[in-house]
């Protein structure tokens, strides 16, 4: 049986090497493509640039954190290309609103200011935040992060503002492709309670809530993530055949 094509999109301030062994394990079952997110203040342009790099065939797409925001936009623009969407520790509306859980706007504004003044120090605090409550994984996460040096902090400021201002709930609600969601009960960046709201927007979506996985479940609970992804893609493939 021909392998399905699976595209992985990383989170803000990260790079494709962050996936590490998780991508290697996925590649045993799928044709995996790792993408370094391009920089633009326009999500449409980012989506189009990514898809232009891919072979002309349908694909599944997994977006982690900010990568989930980009993946949602790709699924919207290219409905005939995306066979299934997997959102991992991702929030379609990252900043909290009156009726949606997320990061307080004051918090992200403060983070943005700190990053502008002290980018390297702020990034290190950001790494710690993603591993909050899971110190034994911090070393490995930092090692993966350091595989590629950040060259342009201004580009990261552009992406951070895009994350702050993007609200893709309407897009999520109107997607027709199969959708899977991976959340953690102790994620410091993406509240687990959005899972129920996503289920309302997409009643047929598949969801798993991991215990104590933080914001980096592909590292902290890679086996559970792999099993969930395999089940989702296998079920989707059977339903589409």
Image (cartoon, rainbow, N blue to C red):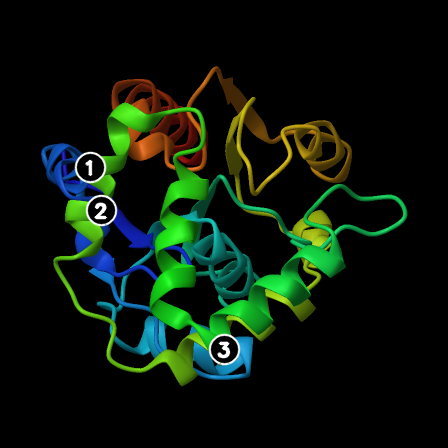
Residue displayed at 18% across by 42% down? 23
Q: Is residue 210 left or right of residue 226?
A: right
Q: Nearer the viewer, residue 113 or 153?
A: 113
| Circle 3: element type | helix
* Rendered-image quadrant of the N terminus: top left
Residue 236: x and y in percent read 42, 31
Residue 88: x and y in percent read 45, 39
Residue displayed at 53% across by 20% down? 209
Is there a contact, CB below 8 Å, between mark 3 and mark 2? no
Residue 10: x and y in percent read 34, 55
Q: N-terminal of the two: label 1 or label 3?
A: 3
Name the residue carrying label 1.
139
* Rendered-image quadrant of the C terminus: top left
Is there a contact, CB below 8 Å, between mark 2 and mark 1? yes
Name the residue carrying label 2.
142
Q: Answer few, some or many: residues within 10 Å of disc 2's Cα (few below 14, many 20 plus, some between 14 and 19).
A: some
| Circle 1: element type | helix
Residue displayed at 59% across by 74% down? 161
- Alpha-carbon span between mark 3 and mark 2: 21 Å
- Vertical order, 10 against 48 (above or below): above
Residue sticking out furthest to the right: 98
Disc sitting over residue 216 in the figure: none
Name the residue carrying label 3.
116
Q: N-terminal of the two: label 3 or label 2?
A: 3
Q: Image quarter for residue 42?
A: bottom right
| Circle 2: element type | helix
- Vertical order, 227 against 25 (above or below): above
């Amino acid at each position: 049986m021909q392998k399905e094509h699976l595209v992985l999109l990383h989170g803000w301030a990260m790079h494709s090497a962050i996936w590490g062994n998780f991508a290697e394990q996925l590649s045993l079952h799928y044709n995996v493509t790792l993408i370094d997110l391009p920089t633009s203040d326009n999500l449409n342009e980012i989506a189009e640039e990514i898809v232009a790099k891919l072979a002309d065939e349908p694909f599944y797409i997994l977006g982690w954190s900010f990568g989930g925001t980009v993946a949602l936009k790709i699924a919207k623009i290219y409905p005939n290309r995306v066979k299934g969407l997997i959102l991992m520790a991702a929030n379609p509306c990252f900043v909290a609103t009156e009726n949606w859980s997320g990061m307080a706007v004051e918090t992200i504004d403060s983070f943005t200011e700190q990053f502008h003044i002290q980018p390297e120090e702020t990034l290190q605090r950001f790494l710690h935040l993603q591993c909050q409550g899971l110190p034994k994984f911090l070393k490995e996460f930092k090692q993966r992060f350091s595989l590629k040096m950040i060259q342009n902090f201004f580009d990261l400021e552009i992406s951070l503002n895009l994350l702050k201002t993007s609200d893709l709930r309407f897009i999520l609600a109107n997607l027709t492709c199969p959708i899977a969601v991976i959340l953690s009960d102790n994620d410091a960046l993406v509240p687990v309670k959005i899972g129920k709201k996503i289920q309302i927007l997409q009643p047929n979506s598949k969801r798993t809530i991991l215990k104590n996985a933080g914001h980096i479940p592909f590292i902290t609970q890679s086996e559970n993530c792999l099993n969930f992804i395999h089940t989702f893609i296998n079920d989707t493939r059977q339903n589409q055949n």
